[in-house]
Image: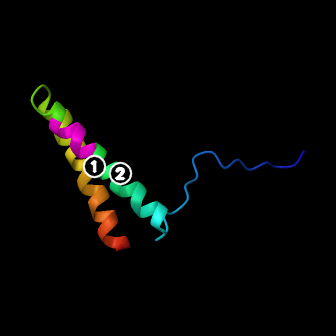
Amino acid sequence: MENQYCKVGTSTPISKSSNAISFLEYQYALFMEKASQIKNSDAKLGEFFELKASKISKMLEGLL
């Protein structure tokens, strides 16, 4: 029997295409909106969303 290799969990790097940049901008806005909505009721979760947004912002800076 031959070995079979599965691609589960593999990732594709984000390129500099306009689709990737617009997707990251959308994700950034979404996480910032979630952070502002939740921050009053759950500070830890709000900080988590802000951290995710800051990571996406750094990725955007690298692509632009």
Residue 41 place in picture, x, y as percent: 12, 25
For this rendering, which residue is in front, 34 or 51? 34
Taking the magenta stretch, the answer to whether it contains residue 27 is: no
Q: Residue at x 17, y 33 (%)?
A: 37
Residue flagged by tag 1: what amino acid is it?
Ala
Residue flagged by tag 2: what amino acid is it?
Tyr
For this rendering, which residue is in front, 13 or 24? 24
Corner quadrant of residue 24: bottom left
Q: Is residue 32 above or below residue 39?
A: below
- Assign the magenta stretch its main secondary structure: helix
Residue 34 place in picture, x, y as percent: 24, 37
Corner quadrant of residue 55: bottom left
Q: What is the residue that sits farthest to the left in this orientation?
A: 40
Magenta stretch, residue numbers: 31-36
Q: Is residue 20 above or below residue 39?
A: below
Q: Which mark is residue 26?
A: 2
> Would you say the residues marked 1 and 2 are in contact, meaning their CB atoms lie under 8 Å apart?
yes
| Figure quadrant of the C terminus | bottom left
Residue 47 place in picture, x, y as percent: 17, 41
